[in-house]
Image: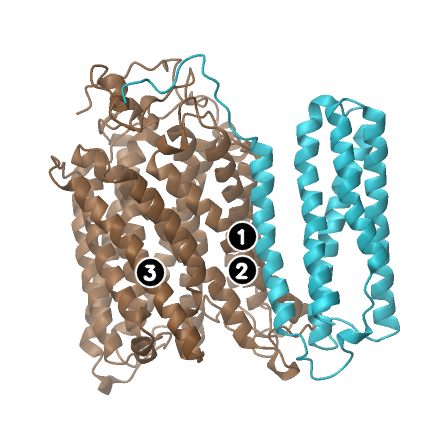
C-alpha cells in the first residue's frame, strides 16, 4: 500500500534534528509551542494517567473479586473509586482527545500551527499542573484536622457530602481547585481549536470539505465552551461554601443540595458527548481508509454530530430520575434522551454503509473500529433501556448503570483511542506499531472487555449497588464478581502489551514512510514525523480527499462532489 | 459539476482568529454566568433569616455609566480605524473613567450593605447569591479595567497605532460583553429579584 509517492512539496530535510544534550532535548519539550509536540505531550500525559487510573481500577476489581475482602480499607476504597473516575474523565480522556485534536487538526486543514500557539502551551501546562495538584492530595491533603486526604466523595461529589461539615480537611478543596485549573486549560484549548478550524484553513478547505475528524473536533470544542464552564461555576460555589461560609449547598440555611446535582449533570452529560464525539471522529477517518471507500453520507454525519451537540444540553436530568421529579420533568428527559438514539443510529448506519461493498483491510486500526461500531450499538441500546424512567428507578446506581457507561467509555471511547494510536502512531513517530502485538492487544482487550462488562450488567440486575467496598457471601454475586475481575485483569494484560508495543516499535518498528495506509487526508502529505512547519508550501484543496486527487489526477474527486 | 472549485486568483477569506477566539471565550463566560444567574433565581425568597432584597437600591447612575462606556469604546474603535490616535486615547480614557465610576459605585453599595444592613456572603442565601453574582460581574469589570489600562499606558507611550485596530476591536468585544451581561445581572437582581 505504501508505494505511492505524493507530489506535494515537502522535502526540506529531517523533521526533528536529533542533536544536543539531554538537557537541550528536555528544554525543547518544555518551552515548545509546536502543536505537534504539545499534542504528543498531551497524549503522553493522558496515557500516563490512563495507566494510573487503570491501576486504580485493578485495585477496585481485586477488592470486589471476593466477598468480605479486606485488600483495601473502606476509606481507601472511597478514595480510589473517586480518583479512578475523576482521573479517567479529566486527566486521561480529555487530554488524549485534545492531544489528538492538537496534533491532527492543523495538519488536516493544511495549517502550519494552531491559531494561538502560546495559548496552546499555556493550556497544556495548566492541565498538567491541575493533574499534579489532584494527585498531590494523596500526600499533601492532611489539612487542619488531620482528616483530609484524597477526594473520596465520588467523581460527581454530591452535596452535602462535600460541605465542610462532612468533608473536613482539604480533600474536596483539592478536587475543586485541581479541576478548576485543568478546566481553564481545557477551555483554552477548546477556544484554540475553534479559532484554528474557522480561521486557519488552507486555500480551498471550505467547511464542506473539511475532514469529518476536524468537523467533530470543532463541534466538541464548541460544546466544551458550554460544558466545562458550568462545572467551574459550581466548583467556585462549592469553594465559596467551604471557605467563606456561603450557603449554596447548605441545607441547614435553606440551600438545596439538589441544585448541585443539577449543575453537575448540566456539565456531566454534555461531557459524555465531549468524550464520545472524538471517538466517532476517529472512526470517521479510519473506517473509510480501511474500507477503501469514501465515507458514506458526509453531510448526514456532520448534521447528526451537530444534532448530538445540541440535544446533549437538554438531557442532563436523566441522571436524576431517582431524585424525584415531576412527571413533566421525567417525560421530557425520557424523550430528549431517546432522541440521541436517532442521531447515533444515523451514524452507525453510515459506518456500516461505508464498509458495505468495500474491500476491507483488517489491519489493527480497522479491527478496533469494527469492535467500536459493534459496542457502540450495544452501549446505545442499554442507554435506551436506562432512559426509560421506570427502568431507571429500578436499576439506577446499580452495577447495570456502571456497566452501561463503561460500555461507552471503554468499549467505545478507549477502543477508538486505541484505533487512533495504531492509525496515527506512524505519522507521529515515523515507525509502524507492530501488527502482531497489535492483534494480541486487540483480541485480549476485546475479550477481557466483554467478560468484564457483559457480566457486570447481570450483577447489576441482581441488585449489586455501585460504590460499595465489599459485599456478603450469600448475595449470589460471588462468581459473577470473580468473572468481572478476571476480565479486568485480562484487559490489564492487553494494555501492558499495548504499552510495550508503543515502546518497542518506537525503536524497532518498521519504517512508515509518509503515507503507510494509502490514505486521503492532508496529514499524510507530509513526512513522518512532520517537520515543524508542517507544509513547505501551503496546500490547495479541491475536494474532501485531497490526496486522492493528487494520486489520481485523471479521476479526481472534485469532479463528482457537489 | 466539473468546474474546478478553486482558482489561483480566487479570493480566500477566513474570519479573524482573534474575534473567533474572543467570541468563544464569551460563549464560555455565558456558561459561568448562567449558572450563577440560575442559582440567584432559584434562591429568590428562600432565605430563612436575615435581610431580604428589599434593602437594595437600583444603581441607576452606575448602570448608565457602564452602558455608556460601551458607546465610548465603540467611538474609540472607530477613531483608531481612521488613525486618529489622540481621539482614540481620549475616548479610551473616558471608557476607563466610566468603568472606574461603576466599580466605585459597587464598592460603596457593598460598604453600605455590609456595615449598615449587616449583609455578608455568610448571612443568608440572599447574601450568598447576591455577592457571588454581582461579585462575579465586578471581577470581570476589574479584569477589563486592567486590560483597558494596559492599552492606555501603551497608547500614552505612543506604541499603539492604526495597525492595532483589529486587536483593539477584539478586546472591545470583551468589554461589550461585560456591559451586556450587566443588563442581565441588573434585571435579575434589581428588577426581578426585588
Q: Is residue A256 visible?
A: yes
Spot occupied by residue A506 in the image (x, y as percentages of width and height): 30, 33
What x and y, as percent, mark residue B2? 27, 19
- Given the current orientation, which residue lies at the most extreme front position? B1
Task: Count neighbours of disc 2 (C-alpha within 10 A) and say few if under 14, some if 14 to 19, many if 20 or more.
Answer: many
Residue A346 higher or lower than A450, as above or below: above
Contact (CB < 8 A) between labels 2 and 1? yes
Mark 1 or mark 3, which is nearer the start of the sequence? 1
Dot 1 crowding, Cα within 10 Å, few <14, some 14–19, many 20+: many
Label 1 sits on residue: A183
Q: Among the chains, which one is brown?
A: A
Q: Are marks 3 and 1 on the same chain?
A: yes
Return the residue at label 2: A231
Residue A441 visible at all: no
Chain of the residue under label 2: A
- Looking at the rendered structure, the secondary structure element under dot 1 is helix
Chain coloured cyan: B
Q: Say which quadrant the C terminus of chain A sits in.
A: top left
Please name the residue shown 50% across and 30% down the image: A199
Q: Nearer the viewer, mark 3 or mark 2?
A: 3
By what rule are the colours in the image chosen? by chain
Q: Are marks 2 and 1 on the same chain?
A: yes
Q: Which residue is more in the foreground, A52 or A230?
A: A230
Q: Is residue B84 above or below residue B30?
A: above
The residue to which callout 3 is attached is A339
Looking at the rendered structure, the number of numbered marks drawn on it comes to 3
> What residue appears at the point 27 percent right and 29 percent down from the top-left corner?
A431
Of badges 3 and 1, nearer the viewer stands 3
| Pointer 1 chain | A
Q: Earlier in the sequence, mark 3 or mark 2?
A: 2
In three-dimensional space, the C-alpha distance between marks 2 and 1, rounded to whole angstroms, equals 8 Å
**Quadrant assignment, res B44:** bottom right
Amino acid at each position: 500500500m505504501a508505494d505511492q509517492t505524493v507530489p506535494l512539496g515537502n522535502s526540506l530535510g529531517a523533521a526533528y534534528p536529533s542533536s544536543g544534550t539531554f538537557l537541550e532535548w528536555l528544554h525543547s519539550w518544555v518551552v515548545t509551542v509546536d502543536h505537534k509536540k504539545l499534542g504528543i505531550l498531551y497524549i503522553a500525559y493522558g496515557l500516563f494517567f490512563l495507566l494510573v487510573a487503570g491501576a486504580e481500577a485493578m485495585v477496585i476489581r481485586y477488592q470486589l473479586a471476593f466477598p468480605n475482602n479486606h485488600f483495601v480499607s473502606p476509606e481507601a476504597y472511597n478514595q480510589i473509586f473517586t480518583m479512578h473516575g475523576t482521573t479517567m474523565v479529566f486527566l486521561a480522556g480529555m487530554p488524549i482527545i485534545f492531544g489528538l485534536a492538537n496534533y491532527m487538526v492543523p495538519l488536516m486543514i493544511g495549517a502550519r500551527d494552531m491559531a494561538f500557539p502560546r495559548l496552546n502551551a499555556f493550556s497544556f501546562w495548566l492541565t498538567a499542573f491541575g493533574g499534579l495538584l489532584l494527585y498531590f492530595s494523596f500526600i499533601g491533603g492532611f489539612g487542619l484536622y488531620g482528616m483530609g486526604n484524597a477526594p473520596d466523595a465520588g467523581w460527581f461529589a454530591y452535596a452535602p457530602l462535600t460541605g465542610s461539615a462532612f468533608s473536613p480537611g482539604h480533600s474536596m478543596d483539592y478536587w475543586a481547585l485541581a479541576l478548576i485549573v485543568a478546566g481553564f486549560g481545557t477551555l483554552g484549548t477548546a477556544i484554540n481549536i475553534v479559532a484554528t478550524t474557522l480561521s486557519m484553513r488552507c486555500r480551498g478547505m471550505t467547511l464542506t470539505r473539511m475532514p469529518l475528524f476536524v468537523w467533530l473536533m470543532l463541534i466538541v470544542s464548541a460544546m466544551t465552551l458550554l460544558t466545562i464552564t458550568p462545572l467551574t461555576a459550581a466548583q467556585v460555589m462549592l469553594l465559596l461554601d467551604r471557605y467563606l461560609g456561603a450557603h449554596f449547598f447548605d441545607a441547614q440555611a435553606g440551600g438545596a443540595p439538589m441544585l448541585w446535582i443539577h449543575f453537575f449533570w448540566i456539565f456531566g452529560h454534555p461531557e459524555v458527548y465531549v468524550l464520545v464525539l472524538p471517538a466517532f471522529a476517529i472512526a470517521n477517518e479510519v473506517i473509510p481508509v480501511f474500507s477503501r471507500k469514501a465515507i458514506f453520507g458526509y453531510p448526514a454525519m456532520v448534521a447528526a454530530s451537530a444534532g448530538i451537540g445540541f440535544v446533549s444540553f437538554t438531557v442532563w436530568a436523566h441522571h436524576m430520575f431517582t431524585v424525584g421529579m415531576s412527571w413533566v420533568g421525567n417525560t421530557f428527559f425520557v424523550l430528549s434522551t431517546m432522541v440521541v438514539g436517532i442521531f447515533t443510529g444515523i451514524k452507525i448506519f453510515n459506518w456500516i454503509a461505508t464498509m458495505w461493498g468495500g474491500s476491507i483491510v483488517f489491519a489493527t486500526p480497522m479491527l478496533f473500529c469494527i469492535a467500536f461500531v459493534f459496542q457502540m450499538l450495544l452501549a446505545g441500546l442499554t442507554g435506551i433501556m436506562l432512559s426509560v424512567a421506570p427502568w431507571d428507578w429500578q436499576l439506577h446506581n446499580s452495577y447495570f448503570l456502571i456497566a452501561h457507561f463503561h460500555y461507552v467509555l471503554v468499549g467505545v471511547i478507549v477502543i477508538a483511542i486505541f484505533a487512533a494510536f495504531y492509525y496515527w502512531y506512524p505519522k507521529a513517530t515515523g515507525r509502524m506499531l507492530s501488527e502482531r502485538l497489535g492483534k494480541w492487544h486487540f483480541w485480549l482487550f476485546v475479550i477481557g472487555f466483554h467478560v468484564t462488562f457483559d457480566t457486570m450488567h447481570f450483577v447489576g440486575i441482581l441488585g449489586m449497588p455501585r460504590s460499595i467496598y465489599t459485599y456478603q457471601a450469600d448475595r449470589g454475586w460471588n462468581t459473577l464478581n470473580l468473572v468481572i475481575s478476571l476480565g479486568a485483569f485480562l484487559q490489564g494484560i492487553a494494555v501492558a502489551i499495548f504499552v510495550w508495543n508503543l515502546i518497542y516499535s518506537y525503536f524497532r518498528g518498521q519504517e512508515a514512510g509518509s503515507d503507510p495506509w494509502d490514505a486521503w487526508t492532508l496529514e499524510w502529505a507530509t513526512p513522518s514525523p512532520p517537520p515543524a512547519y508542517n507544509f513547505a508550501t501551503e496546500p490547495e484543496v479541491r475536494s474532501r480527499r485531497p490526496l486522492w486527487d493528487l494520486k489520481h489526477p485523471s479521476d479526481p474527486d472534485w469532479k463528482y462532489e457537489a | 459539476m466539473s468546474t474546478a472549485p478553486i482558482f489561483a486568483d480566487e479570493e480566500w477569506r477566513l474570519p479573524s482568529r482573534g474575534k473567533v477566539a474572543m467570541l468563544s471565550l464569551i460563549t464560555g463566560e455565558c456558561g459561568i454566568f448562567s449558572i450563577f444567574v440560575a442559582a440567584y433565581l432559584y434562591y429568590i425568597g428562600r432565605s430563612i433569616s436575615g435581610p431580604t432584597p428589599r434593602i437594595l437600591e437600583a444603581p441607576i447612575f452606575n448602570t448608565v455609566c457602564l452602558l455608556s462606556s460601551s458607546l465610548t469604546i465603540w467611538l474609540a474603535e472607530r477613531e483608531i480605524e481612521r488613525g486618529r490616535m489622540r481621539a482614540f486615547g481620549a475616548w479610551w480614557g473616558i471608557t476607563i473613567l466610566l468603568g472606574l465610576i461603576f466599580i466605585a459605585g459597587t464598592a460603596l453599595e457593598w460598604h453600605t450593605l455590609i456595615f449598615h444592613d449587616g449583609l455578608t456572603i455568610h448571612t443568608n442565601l440572599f447574601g450568598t447569591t447576591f455577592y457571588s453574582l454581582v461579585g462575579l460581574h465586578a471581577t470581570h469589570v476589574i479584569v477589563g479595567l486592567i486590560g483597558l489600562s494596559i492599552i492606555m499606558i501603551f497608547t500614552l507611550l505612543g506604541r499603539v497605532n492604526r495597525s492595532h485596530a483589529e486587536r483593539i476591536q477584539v478586546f472591545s468585544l470583551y468589554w461589550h460583553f461585560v456591559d451586556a451581561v450587566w443588563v442581565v445581572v441588573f434585571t435579575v437582581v434589581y428588577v426581578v429579584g426585588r
